[in-house]
Image (tube, rainbow, N blue to C red):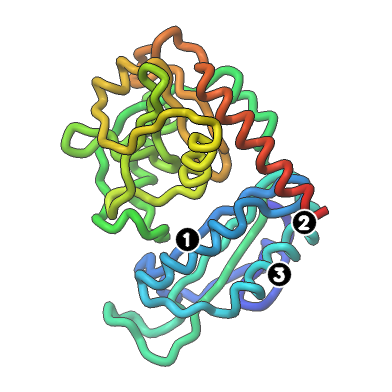
């Protein structure tokens, strides 16, 4: 985390940033969030992030605290004030501050906070080595399509994966992989990418959406269907995508190598194309 954050209209040193103990995001997890990558000092995948943010807010009937243009301006200001060249901006909007009551309170103003962080997105060493994944039970609620700040299930799953040597967890429910703890999950078999179709059971990942577009443009075959752990272990390749990883190869699951245990060619191709797309997008605004 860098030095200047945004809290309800104010840019503050992070040491001075506070929220009310009655904020419903703090008490109930009653809010949503987004993470937007920054390349060359510019936000990328911006349109898709705004669309998903609007959908999440709508699903929870939370009002925008300001216009979408104001949100973008604020996030750009954070990038400037913190001199972020490569990294991300985190944004959170909650229903607001009210006395503790489960029902939606009337007449309150949504809260908004944001911060920026420096991250190595393009030259990530894990892109060369790949990462180990550990499977873990999916303990989350049934509206996973909303990018909610209710993340305790993911916290428990990530800690479970880390404690057993994983860099990411793949959550399992009813014998099939749902998604990564903080990423979308994919396998490759016989030159076909397989990923779970969208539903209330997974988050509609922005990187996932872009990867599907890249597959179409590059004539890479793709199937949207459920896949089991056994299928994943027998795959030719596996990988994840997220705002902070872009595309990263998975080289083992539960300690078992995927194929040769090295990043696969389709994964590497997709990462290269995605990074090129992000760089082009960032340079268009310079």
Q: Which residue is mark 2?
A: 82
Mark 2 touches mark 3? (CB < 8 Å): no
Of labels 2 and 1, earlier in sequence is 1
Observer able to see residue 231: yes
Secondary structure under badge 3?
helix
The label on residue 73 is 3
Residue 129 is situated, as x and y percent measured from the top left of the image, at: 57, 17
Gap between marks 2 and 1, in whole Å? 25 Å
Q: Nearer the viewer, mark 3 or mark 1?
A: 1
Q: Residues within 10 Å of mark 3 (few under 14, many from 20)?
A: few
Q: Residue at x 49, y 85 (%)?
A: 109
Work out whether residue 149 or residue 98 is closer to the camera in this orientation and state it: 149
Secondary structure under badge 2?
loop
Marker count (numbered): 3
Gap between marks 2 and 3, in whole Å? 14 Å
Residue 194 is situated, as x and y percent measured from the top left of the image, at: 35, 30
Relative vertical location of residue 164 with respect to residue 153 in this rendering, above or below? above
């Amino acid at each position: 985390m860098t030095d200047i954050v945004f809290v309800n209209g104010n840019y503050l040193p992070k040491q001075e940033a506070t929220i009310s103990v009655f904020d419903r995001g703090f008490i109930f997890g009653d809010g949503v969030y987004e993470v937007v990558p920054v390349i060359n000092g510019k936000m990328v995948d911006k349109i898709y992030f705004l669309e998903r943010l609007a959908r999440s807010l709508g699903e929870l009937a939370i009002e925008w605290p300001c216009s979408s243009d104001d949100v973008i301006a604020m996030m750009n200001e954070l990038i400037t004030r913190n001199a972020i060249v490569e990294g991300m901006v985190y944004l959170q909007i909650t229903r607001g501050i009210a006395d503790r009551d489960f029902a939606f309170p009337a007449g309150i103003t949504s809260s908004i906070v944001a911060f920026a962080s420096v991250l190595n997105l393009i030259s990530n060493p894990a892109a060369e080595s790949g990462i180990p994944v550990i499977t873990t039970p999916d303990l989350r609620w049934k509206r996973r399509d909303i990018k909610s700040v209710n993340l305790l299930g993911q916290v428990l799953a990530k800690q479970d994966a880390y404690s057993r040597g994983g860099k990411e967890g793949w959550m399992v429910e009813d014998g099939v992989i749902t998604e990564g703890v903080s990423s979308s999950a994919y396998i490759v078999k016989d030159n076909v990418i397989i990923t779970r179709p969208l539903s209330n059971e997974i988050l509609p990942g922005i990187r996932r959406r872009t990867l599907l577009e890249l597959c179409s443009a590059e004539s890479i075959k793709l199937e949207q269907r459920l896949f089991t752990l056994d299928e994943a272990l027998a795959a030719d390749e596996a990988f994840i995508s997220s705002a902070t990883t872009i595309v990263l190869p998975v080289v083992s699951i539960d300690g078992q190598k995927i194929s040769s245990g090295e990043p696969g060619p389709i994964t590497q191709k997709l990462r290269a194309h995605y990074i090129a797309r992000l760089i082009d997008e960032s340079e268009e605004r310079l």
